[in-house]
Amino acid sequence: MRRRRDRLAEWAKAIGASLKQVREAWEDLKYRGLAREEEGEISLSPLAMRRAISDVQRRLASHLSGYLLTDNPYIVRKVGNPPGKPQILNTRIFVEYIANYFRDGWGVLEIQKELPFLTREEIEAAIQYYLNHRKEIDREREESERMYEKSAPKGEAVVV
C-alpha cells in the first residue's frame, strides 16, 4: 500500500496535480479499462490520452505513456532530450508531414483522402499546430532535408 501511495505521489508531482486528483484519475482509467495494474506492473491503453475525461487524467496518461503534451490536445511529443518532433496523438504521423501537404496547397479533405486513417479534427489540429509553430516546424523540416542530403547515396544516375 505504501509503495502504491509513493507511486501516486510521484505521478502527482510530475504532472502538477494533487495526490487526490491523481488517485481519482488513475482509478477512473482503470475502471474504464484504459489502464491496468498487475503485480506492480502498469499498462496503459493507447487510447487513454484520447479518452481522458479531465485535464488531470490526460496529463497522467501522457506521463505514463512517455509523451509530453502540447498546447493542442491532438498533438504530442515523445519525452527525451531534446523532445521528439510533434506528432498526432496515437499515430506515427508528424505535424511536419501534414505541414508539407498544407504548404503544397492541399486542403483538409484532400489530405484525408490521402491519409484516411486520420480524422478531420486530427488534420485540422496538425495544420493549426503548424501555423502556431511555423518557425520551429520549418526549422525541423530543413534539418531533416539536410540530414537526408548528407546521407543520400551519391553517384551517377543510370539512364536506361
Image (cartoon, grey):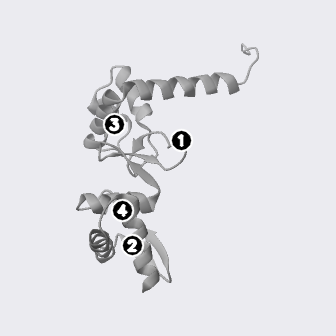
In the rendered structure, which disc, 1 or 2, sits on the residue that comes first in sequence? 2
Residue at (32% x, 71% y) in the render = 19
Q: Is residue 36 above or below residue 55?
A: below
Q: Give the residue at mark 3.
A: 126
At 29% from the left and 69% from the top, the residue drawn is: 25
Callout 3: helix, strand or loop?
A: helix
Q: Is residue 142 above or below residue 64?
A: above
Q: Is residue 76 left or right of residue 39?
A: left
Contact? badges 3 and 4 (CB < 8 Å):
no
Identify the amino acid type marked 3: Ala
What is the residue that sits farthest to the bottom in this orientation?
1
Front of the two marks 2 and 4: 2
Precedes in sequence: disc 2 or disc 4: 2
**Residue, disc 1:** 82
Task: Locate the N terminus by quadrant.
Answer: bottom left
Disc 2 marks which residue? 8
Instruction: Say which label, 3 or 1, has the lower sequence index.
Output: 1
In three-dimensional space, the C-alpha distance between marks 3 and 4, rounded to whole angstroms, equals 22 Å
**Real-space CA distance between mark 2 and mark 3, rounded to the nearest whole angstrom:** 32 Å
For badge 1, the amino acid type reads: Pro
Dot 1 falls on a residue whose secondary structure is loop
In front: 11, or 87?
11
Q: Residues within 10 Å of mark 2 (few under 14, many from 20)?
A: some
